[in-house]
Image (cartoon, rainbow, N blue to C red):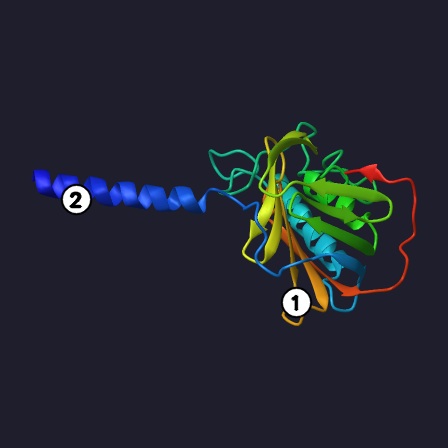
Amino acid sequence: MRRILASSLLAWAAAAATLGGCASGPKAEAPAGVTLAGTWKLDRAASDDPQKIIARMRAQAFKLIARRSAPPPAGGAPGAAAGVPPPDENGGAPGDEAGSTHGRGAPPDPLRRSPMMHALARALARGEFLTVRQSPEELVLDYGTTVRSFTPGARSVVSAEQGVADQISGWSGREYVIEARAQLGPNVVERYALSQNGQHLIETLRIGPAELPAVELKRVYDHTDEVAPRALPTSD
């Protein structure tokens, strides 16, 4: 029995060590020969259409409103179906500013106060140009109007939609990953990598899940010699 118990403990310790290594997060060192540096311009045709993603989010929010407005089952409460989050302080769906309009014209946009929509809108507002500067100590994403800088492998506390988030960034294989885990609201994960032929920079943005199911947006950038419009840069 003691041998069996000892073997079980050793197996558990090995599994825990393996999981601990996997959970350590992105690394500080870039893979040999991998550089994302360059000036890039968004290829809209090759990228996901953000309007389709927003339309899907809006439809999901309206479904939540409808489910909450449905008559409750016997002995239950409105919206008590499994998997339906409780109403916000205004009685509406996540992001719904005023709940039901009770027949007073069109309902308000359910994404108006959605933290996930706000995170997506901030990403889309950065524009179509991106200059990447890379060194062992820093990765800079310069959009012309906004400059974001990251220290590979470093952890920090950053502002988020509903407070603060724990952020870590660094290399995961050949991708540079920026992960912000919010205390409240949606988590946001960004991944940047080169295409197989090295001619395109691919950004994958994942937001949530939170008040709505998670959404993912892929954007493809091409090398460009164009000069990005400049404005007084701000830190994001």
Residue 42 in which image quadrant: bottom right
Residue 74: x and y, percent? Answer: 48, 37
Q: Decide which of tag 2 and tag 1 comes sooner along the chain.
A: 2
Q: Residues within 10 Å of mark 2 (few under 14, many from 20)?
A: few
Task: Write the residue at 59% across / 30% down.
Answer: 183
Check disc 1 and report the residue beneath it.
Answer: 195
Residue 204: x and y, percent? Answer: 65, 56
- The label on residue 28 is none
> Residue 131 versus residue 81: which sits nearer the camera?
131
Whether residue 7 is visible here, answered yes or no, is yes
Depicted 128 relative to depicted 160: above or below? below
Amino acid type, mark 1 = Ser
Task: Write the residue at 58% across / 41% down.
Answer: 153
CB-based contact (under 8 Å), mark 2 and mark 1: no
Whether residue 120 is visible here, answered yes or no, is no
Amino acid type, mark 2 = Ser
> Residue 12 versus residue 88: which sits nearer the camera?
12
Task: Write the residue at 82% across / 45% down.
Answer: 106
Residue 56 in which image quadrant: bottom right
SS for callout 2: helix
Left-right relation of 59 to 153: right
- The outermost residue toward the bottom is 197
SS for callout 1: loop
Check disc 2 and report the residue beneath it.
Answer: 7
Left-right relation of 36 to 166: right
